[in-house]
Image: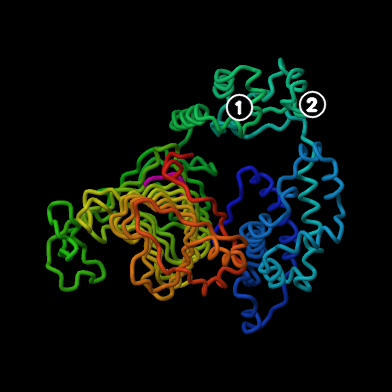
Amino acid sequence: MLASMIPADEESNFSTFRDCLSEPVIRKLAIKPPKVSKRRAAKGRKSAIKPVYPKDDQDDARQSNDAEELGEFYLALEIFPSLPTDLRTLSYSATQADPALSDKYADPLSPTLLDAIAAPLPTSVADSLATYNLLPDAPTSLPSFLGPVIAAYAATAAAAPPVWAQTRASACELCDRDWVPLTYHHLIPRSVHAKAVRRGWAEEWELNKVAWLCRACHSFVHSVAGNEELAREWASVERLAEREDVQRWARWRATTALAMYYTPGFGKTSELQWTALSVKSWLEDDVARVIVLNKEYNFIGTEGTTTATGCRPTSNTCPGAGGQDAINANGWCGTAPSVSVTYDNAGVTAINLGSNKSLIGVGSAGVIRGKGLRIANGAKNIIIQNIHITELNPQYIWGGDAITLDGSDLVWISLVGRQMFVAGYEASNRVSLTNNEFDGSTSWSATCDGHHYWTILLLGSSDLITMKGNYIHHTSGRGPKVGGNTLLHAVNNEFYAISGHAFDMGESGAMAVAEGNVFQNVVTPLLSPVEGRIFTAPSTSANTACATYLGRNCVINAFGSSGTFTGTTDTSFFSNLNGKTIASASTAAYTDGTAGIGKI
């Protein structure tokens, strides 16, 4: 279930492991598998990735893509978090501190060690490899498959550093500008080398570490701290990038110079868009793109307006004073009293994203006004990060949804500000909503109290969704409403100032695990009656039921000036968690400081 959460200090090693794993997968899949009947091909574990054998004239490209996806997007995420800690964090520095690590992970690895590494892996790893004919005898042959992969990874991770000054980067390592001249900055200034070793700030082999910086960033780094402090506290690019003043500087340098050097169609992997129409066009095409937004893109008025007959639902008890009338979408109005409605057409017709897109905002500047995003019809491998979506006919019900999924896979939505997320009836697999802000403060409320009602709707036929670290506030309902056959993991979110209800398990197929969340000033955390199944981590004793399926005990939710969950210890659906990658959980805490746009 749910996208893996790789710790920041392990991301580099994860990338190395992913590359080492992809190489043998791609090599072995270059041999075309024998044709099998459709009946035979359909067999196998439900959680395993099923092979797709392309037509003859497309074999090479399609097989390669299949292999890369298997290695990069599934197996690596399944295997890496289960590896021993000393293997996940292996580095040259670690082997210098503990020479036994070099012997332990030297090639060839011992059969005993490989068996120990393979033992805790999810069963779906061996199943998927066997399905792709990569394991002749799953799972007994899994250790022998992993042997060369682990050996290659360990050799790379623990390799001695190169001559630092020769490892030239392609862009400034702070502001990421790739069109300006670069200089190298000694992360441990040469004037304090002797003191750094004597005081234990660095090992001798680390003294010549450098960062490739543009001249502006190089000068700025030397302005924020003296040489001794740089050597003692800020001797890596990662540490420098943690400083708020460096972050502000890097964002400013990146945004102030963009207009000078980028034009649409410049041929960069990262595209900076200049008009709303170009944003739409590039999001909808079939080209893999990283699209950077450094300003607001306003779609209001670009597609005209419509005046039609809508309705005034019974919920609108304050017409003309903050209530919401409705557009008659799909005949929704029924027999409700008719009213005339005029709405902007851009808001009700979303941008349909193609696969392999990353849409990323700069600072707090990336805004899409008046139009939503739709990920459907099999679109996958999509990241939406650090943007704000707003003003989709907010005065009307059915005025538009910020983000809609309806048949998608591998979608990560993070640090986004918006009011509405919908997962439609078609299955959306492996979806993560992390550190987003669902701000329901509004001038048009279905409940006439300034709180948005239509917050999060999950209705997919077999959706797998993680909600982690989100801040949901000033709403009055559907936050989330879970239906269809959705399996939801809601962990470490903050629900604040909810005038109505948060969770609504309104359909019998709905399944949810809610743990480690904060409910502050929430009138009704869970709407009654509960039609679906939900486990709400009610006590330390009840939470031990999670260990078998989540790999750990669940974490208790926290409540302040709120209602509580009652009678919600249903574990009958936990078997659906088998073979899924489960997000970690920490003690319930407020998330408002880390959620929403501008937090990176």
Q: Residue at x 43, y 60 (%)?
A: 375
The percent coordinates of residue 190 (x first, y second) are 72, 18
In-image side of 383 versus 88 (left or right):
left
The label on residue 204 is 2
Question: Residue under circle 1?
Answer: 213
Q: Residue at x 71, y 15 (%)?
A: 191
Q: Nearer the viewer, residue 206 or 373?
A: 206
Under mark 1, the amino acid is Leu
In-image side of 505 versus 39 (left or right):
left
The percent coordinates of residue 72 (x first, y second) are 64, 56
Task: Tell me which corner region of the image, top left, top right, bottom left or bottom right, holds residue 187.
Answer: top right
Crowding at mark 2 (Cα within 10 Å: few <14, some 14-19, many 20+): few
Cα distance in 3D space between marks 2 and 1: 23 Å
Task: Tell me which corner region of the image, top left, top right, bottom left or bottom right, holds residue 226.
Answer: top right
The percent coordinates of residue 107 (x first, y second) are 86, 52
Q: Which element type, helix, strand or loop, lies under badge 2?
A: helix
User: Do the residues under discs 2 and 1 have CB atoms within 8 angstroms?
Assistant: no
Magenta stretch bounds:
384-388
Question: From the viewer's perspective, is residue 286 above or below residue 528?
Answer: above
Question: From the viewer's perspective, is residue 294 above or below residue 552?
Answer: above
Is residue 83 visible to us here?
yes
**Residue 334 on the magenta segment:** no
Crowding at mark 1 (Cα within 10 Å: few <14, some 14-19, many 20+): many
- In which quadrant will I find the N terminus? bottom right
Q: How is the image coloured?
A: rainbow
Q: Which element type, helix, strand or loop, lies under badge 1?
A: strand
Task: Tell me which corner region of the image, top left, top right, bottom left or bottom right, holds residue 118.
Answer: bottom right
The percent coordinates of residue 70 (x first, y second) are 65, 62
Under mark 2, the amino acid is Glu
